C-alpha cells in the first residue's frame, strides 16, 4: 500500500515572496518557438539516421527521392509546429495575464545572493 505524504507550507510573513503579475508575450513566443524548434530538430536527426540506415540496406532511386521529399516536408512541418507551439504558449500567457490581473498572480519565493 502506497501512502503519499504532502507538506503544505504557508508562507505567511515570508519577506522574499514576489508575485508574478504578468508574463511578456513576446518573450514567451520566442521561448516557445526556439524550444520546440530545437526539440523537433533533435527528433529529426534521429529520424534521419533511421532513414539513412534504411536507404543503405535497400537502396533505389525511388527510395532516395522519397527520402529527400520526406526531409523537405519534415523541415517545413518542424517550422509550422514550432510556430503553432509558440502561438499556444503566447495565448496561455495572455490568459494568465488576464486571470492574474483579476485574481492575483503566482507567488514565488525569491532568494537574492
Image: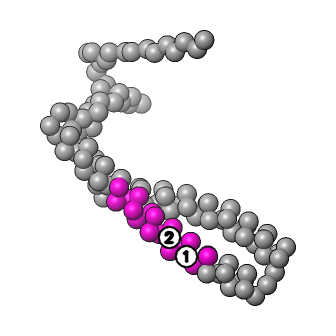
Q: Is residue 26 visible?
A: yes
Residue at left 29%, top 26%?
A: 17
Percent x, y of residue 11: 31, 17
- Please give the name of the residue rendered at 58% of the width and 64% of the height, measured from the top-left corner: 41
Image-quadrant location for residue 75? bottom right
Colouring scheme applied when the structure was drawn: one colour
Q: Estimate the spatial distance between the alpha carbons at disc 1 and disc 2, rounded to whole Å.
A: 6 Å
Rendered location of residue 104, percent (x, y): 20, 33
Circle 2 Cα neighbour tier, 10 Å, few/some/many (<14 / 14–19 / ≥20): few
Outermost residue toward the right in this view: 57
Residue 73, image quadrant: bottom right
Q: Is residue 12 above or below residue 109?
A: above
Q: Position of residue 74 (x, y in %)?
A: 56, 71
Tell me if 54 is positioned left or right of 9 in this view.
Answer: right
Q: Vertical placement of 94 versus 9: above or below?
A: below
Contact? badges 1 and 2 (CB < 8 Å) = yes
Q: How many marks?
A: 2
User: Which residues, given as a range, are shown in magenta?
Assistant: 70-88
Residue at x 73%, y 66% (from the top left corner): 49
Check disc 1 and report the residue beneath it.
Answer: 73
Q: Which mark is residue 77?
A: 2
Which x, y percent locates residue 70? Answer: 61, 76
Does residue 29 appear in the picture of this structure? no
Tell me: residue 42, above or below residue 73.
above
Q: Residue at x 72, y 86 (%)?
A: 62
Amino acid at each position: 500500500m502506497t501512502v503519499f505524504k504532502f507538506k503544505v507550507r504557508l508562507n505567511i510573513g515570508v519577506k522574499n515572496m514576489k508575485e508574478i503579475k504578468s508574463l511578456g508575450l513576446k518573450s514567451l513566443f520566442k521561448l516557445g518557438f526556439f524550444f520546440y524548434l530545437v526539440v523537433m530538430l533533435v527528433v529529426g536527426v534521429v529520424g534521419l539516421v533511421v532513414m539513412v540506415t534504411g536507404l543503405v540496406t535497400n537502396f533505389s532511386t525511388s527510395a532516395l527521392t522519397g527520402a529527400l521529399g520526406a526531409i523537405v516536408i519534415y523541415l517545413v512541418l518542424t517550422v509550422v509546429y514550432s510556430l503553432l507551439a509558440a502561438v499556444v504558449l503566447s495565448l496561455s500567457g495572455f490568459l494568465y495575464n488576464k486571470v492574474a490581473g483579476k485574481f492575483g498572480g503566482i507567488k514565488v519565493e525569491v532568494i537574492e545572493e
